[in-house]
Amino acid sequence: MSATTASIDTPDLTALAARNRLVIGLLIASAFVVILNETLMGVAIPTLIESLGITASLAQWLTTAFMLTLAVVIPITGFLLQRFQTRPMYLLAMSLFTLGTLIGALAPGFEVLLFARIVQASGTAIIFPLLFTTVFALVAPERRGRVVGTISTVIAVAPALGPSVSGLILSVADWRWLFITMLPIAVAALVIGAVRMVDVGEQRPGRLDVLSVLLSIPGFGGLVYGLAEFGEAGRQPAEQAATTTTTAGIALAIGLVALALFVWRQIVLQRTDGALLDLRTFAQRQFAVSIAIVTVASMALFGAIILIPLFVQDVIGASALLSGLIILPGALLQGLLAPWIGRRYDAVGPMSLVIPGSILLSGSLWGMSLFTATTPLWLIAIVNIGVSMGLALLFTPLLTNGLSALSPQLNSHGSAIVGTVQQVAGAAGIALFISIAAAFGGGGSEVASVTAEGVRAAFTVGAIIATLTIPAVFLVRRTPVPATGGEPLGS
């Protein structure tokens, strides 16, 4: 009897593990594509200004609108992933992304191009929470570190590759090829998903709270837009910056008020399990601590990604392509380290990773606070590698540990919160670093510019904030592994 049972169960488990690897692999590949696309447009702004005959402020909306869409849609995904199954959500995400890419390739002018970016962002916003929710539904707790390590590779490498890939494409073709190049990849992911993607996990019926949605739009949207505008003001001439700063302040105030009302609404709805974004996730101490540290780390990541290339171009005098390549070694190393860090987390837990990670991140930012106009490019690249290694040692164990602390019913909400926090923290990091660099830059009143003095001031503030988080990593404790959990993933 036992031999017969084994002969039946083994093939089933093998097939289940193969199915799970396929689903997760497809989601990771899709995440790489959509995250890479997110950072393609930044380098293309000058080209678009010339080709479309638009102002710099108008062109900047191609990136601002993308961020705004992510900030508005991601919080809603916590509800959607509980209500709808994996396959239709994946097909919706990649259909939106593919459609947006096609519209962008055919766009006759700025307005249609802006619409294309919004459609792309709507698909991108679904993929990230869907990936984490699926991983934590399928992967056993003792193996989650290595899988999240692979995801961290995507998160680290894809954004850093974007500017380099964009610069390479624009050096031989016009801006439409940024979309044309992505289109066959997006179509392939959509077709493979239509054929091979299956439904995993369990869904729960629920009712969409319209008031929560209406509050989340000005709440998260106003917050991200206000922060983005503060960052933009730091790169504008003084007279224009004053107007932008006023607009940013108004948007930020509206965002904070709407966000406070949104939080109040979620607390009320949680009592009947009807919240759009369930904030009971923060009742889990390890999730709350992890999210707090990830917020600071994300600010450092996006602040460094935007400020280092500006410093290399405006102060050192290097080309735009070289300024993008400066941050690439750190991102690649971060990606290479992430799987090993994931395995290390599975073996020994988070403490031996997050403590040196926080110290390395803080020390590297202090090193950046010493940059001058004569700092050699190789030294800038090495110090940035230190930042990347610190982030690598933090992201994988913190995300794995924090999300593992949640019950299965809260996994989708936790994934949505992680995605939302990274968007808001990224906008905050850019705004903080750029604003401080401009305020302490010592430039003239006519033209805003990045100077060595401003860069040192920005990284000094970043280093202080990072240093203050070092005590927080000592609060991280490994989330207990349940006796059972997760489906087989295979070796």
Image (spheres, grey):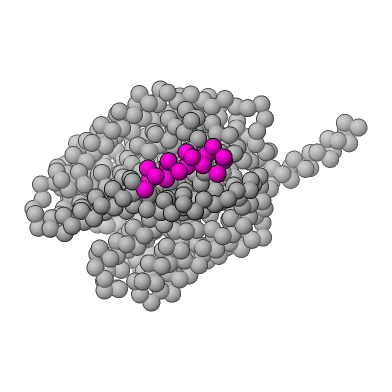
What's the residue at 37%, 67% (across, down)?
Answer: 114
Q: Quadrant of the C terminus?
A: top right
- Report the magenta residues as a range: 258-274
Residue at 42% of width from left, 50% of height from top? Answer: 216
Residue 218 percent coordinates (x, y)? 37, 53
The front one of 403 and 372 is 403
Quadrant containing the N terminus in the rendered view:
top right
Residue nearest the observer in this picture, 131 or 353: 131
What is the quadrant of residue 67 in the picture?
Answer: bottom left
Residue 417 x/y as whole percent: 46, 42
- Indicate left or right for 192 with 311 as reference: right
Q: Main secondary structure of the magenta part?
A: helix
Residue drawn at x 79%, y 39% is 10
**Image position of 103 with respect to 289: above or below:** below
* Residue closest to the eye, 379 or 92: 92
Residue 262: within the magenta? yes
Residue 470 found in image quarter:
top left
**Above/below status of 377 relative to 242:** above
- Horizontal and vertical percent position of residue 367: 24, 34
- Expressed as whole percent of the image width and height from the top left, the position of residue 341 reads 49, 33
Q: Residue furthest bottom?
A: 108
